[in-house]
């Protein structure tokens, strides 16, 4: 009995051990599967908040001229010898209203001499200003950075004397808005002062002093044309900066025609939120409430090099962001026009440009093509509702009656797939054609018919897709 009992106990123990091992193996397998599926789980929960689009177009509801906040471009400090003329036709095709330049004092050798004894030569700057005019745009001048001739140190330092800075700004405005007779130029004091130079709105390196000296120069400028003057072009809209500048300008009777800031983000709703927030701040300053322009002077999805700028990701961001701005943002400057040259010699290196660098055949990136497609819409805007979290749409009607629609699918993870319902309302029963032209090059033609006053189709959209639809009777 004792031997048999030991055997039974051993068998029971072995069964329990095997069962335990099986349970342990099952738990381990489950854990491994959970880990392997973690990206999918994250994607599911990350995308769960996205509201799908359900585009509804009232084809007979015209709501006025199409606003185009995207018709403003910027060029930064990529090259001391940057020229617009080699890409003139490509830039002109985007129909820019304004082109913003920074680095005008350290790139174009405008100022020479020594503190208190300055000379001016605008020859190199005039070359680019002529090129801006040749593409049908006007200049938006970032008064930056400090001319080496008057600086205490480098180009983002303070001047030896603020009187020299006053003279520099005065002579600049007199040349562009006076001698060149260019109307409606914007002059913006500095570029990202909170970053470049570490300026504050208080203390020993005070942006308000920089602004005041520049505003005095603007007031002394003898010119024939009207111009706008403002700033500060900070890296984002900050209430403390806004309050300080608005208060300072008011108390010192200084020109303050526009308030400007930059915004780099993958959340395209921030462009609207920023504007509404600044408008709320502005309501606390009734002396400016009806006159102060609010301008985004740089925007994109990342302020650093990012591979997304070389492909469809940035194109979808730019088109969706621009669509989102309509009705809220009047003027926003796409940064930037052209890449600089990669020190490693790569043609595509995650730079911000719409066009690759000089010496690289100056290829148009997807972002350029997206802007061009967006700008190809006719001028008569048509009512479109049903934008989703990721897919944004815009509709307009051509003079020949055809309806054109742009759809852009952007989410920060580039993972949103949608089969977007698009409904055309207020139409006559009959046969219709929907021609699809995707930014990627894909094309398709849909032949549809309806016996009612409404027609619906579905447009498949991959992540970062941009597509143009043309809807017309067959």
Image (spheres, helix red, strand yellow):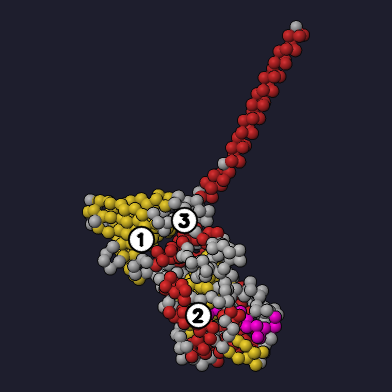
Q: Which residues are magenta?
A: 141-153
Can see residue 405?
yes
The location of residue 310, given as percent across then percent down, is 51, 61
Quadrant assignment for the N terminus:
top right
| Circle 3 Cα neighbour tier, 10 Å, few/some/many (<14 / 14–19 / ≥20) | many
Q: Earlier in the sequence, mark 2 or mark 3?
A: 2
Is residue 240 one of those drawn in magenta? Answer: no
Can see residue 335?
no
**Tag 3, which secondary structure?**
loop
The answer to whether 313 is drawn above or below residue 107 in the figure is above
Residue at x 35%, y 56% (from the top left corner): 436
Q: Which mark is residue 128?
A: 2
Q: Which one is nearer the viewer's eye here, 447 or 422?
A: 447
Q: Which mark is residue 464?
A: 3
Q: Do the numbered discs 2 and 3 sit on residues whose CB atoms are within 8 Å?
A: no
The location of residue 240, given as percent across then percent down, is 61, 73
Q: Which one is nearer the viewer's eye here, 121 or 377?
A: 121
Q: Which mark is residue 205?
A: none
The location of residue 414, given as percent across then percent down, is 50, 53
Cα gap from disc 2 to disc 3, whole angstroms: 34 Å
Nearest-to-viewer mark from 2 and 3: 2
Quadrant assignment for the C terminus:
bottom left
Q: Which residue is mark 1?
A: 405
């Amino acid at each position: 009995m004792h031997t048999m009992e030991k055997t039974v106990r051993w068998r029971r123990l072995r069964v329990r051990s095997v069962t335990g091992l099986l349970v342990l193996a099952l738990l381990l397998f489950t854990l491994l599967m959970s880990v392997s599926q973690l990206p999918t789980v994250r994607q599911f929960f990350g995308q769960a908040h996205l509201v799908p689009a359900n585009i509804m177009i009232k084809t007979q509801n015209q709501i006025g001229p199409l606003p185009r906040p995207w018709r403003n471009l910027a060029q930064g400090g990529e090259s001391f010898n940057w020229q617009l003329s080699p890409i003139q036709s490509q830039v002109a095709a985007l129909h820019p209203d304004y082109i913003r330049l920074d680095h005008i004092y350290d790139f174009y050798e405008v100022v020479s001499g020594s503190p208190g004894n300055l000379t001016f030569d605008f020859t190199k700057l005039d070359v680019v200003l002529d090129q801006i005019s040749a593409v049908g745009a006007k200049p938006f001048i970032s008064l930056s950075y400090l001319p080496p001739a008057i600086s205490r140190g480098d180009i983002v330092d303070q001047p030896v004397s603020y009187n020299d800075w006053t003279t520099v700004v005065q002579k600049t405005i007199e040349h562009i808005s006076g001698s060149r007779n260019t109307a409606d130029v914007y002059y913006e004091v500095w570029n990202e002062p909170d970053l470049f130079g570490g300026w504050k709105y208080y203390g020993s390196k005070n942006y308000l002093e920089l602004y005041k000296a520049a505003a005095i120069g603007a007031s002394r400028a003898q010119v024939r044309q009207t111009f706008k003057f403002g700033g500060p072009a900070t890296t984002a809209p900050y209430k403390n900066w806004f309050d300080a500048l608005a208060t300072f300008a008011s108390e010192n009777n200084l020109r303050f025609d526009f308030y400007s800031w930059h915004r780099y983000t993958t959340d395209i709703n921030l462009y609207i939120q920023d504007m509404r927030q600044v408008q709320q701040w502005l309501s606390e300053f009734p002396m400016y409430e009806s006159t102060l322009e609010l301008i985004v002077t740089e925007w994109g999805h990342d302020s650093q090099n990012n591979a997304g700028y070389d492909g469809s990701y940035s194109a979808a961001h730019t088109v969706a962001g621009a669509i989102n701005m309509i009705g809220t943002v009047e003027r926003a400057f796409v940064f930037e026009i052209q890449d600089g040259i990669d020190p490693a010699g790569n043609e595509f290196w995650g730079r911000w440009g719409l066009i690759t660098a000089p010496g690289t055949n100056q290829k148009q990136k997807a972002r350029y093509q997206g802007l061009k497609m967006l700008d190809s819409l006719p001028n008569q805007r048509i009512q479109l509702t049903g934008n989703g979290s990721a897919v944004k749409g815009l509709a307009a009607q051509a003079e020949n009656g055809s309806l054109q629609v742009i759809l852009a699918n952007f989410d920060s993870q580039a993972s949103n797939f949608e089969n977007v319902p698009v409904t055309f309302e207020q139409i006559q029963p009959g046969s219709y054609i929907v021609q699809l032209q995707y930014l990627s090059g894909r094309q398709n033609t849909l032949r549809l018919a309806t016996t009612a006053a409404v027609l619906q189709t579905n447009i498949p959209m991959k992540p970062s897709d941009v597509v143009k639809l043309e809807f017309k009777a067959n």
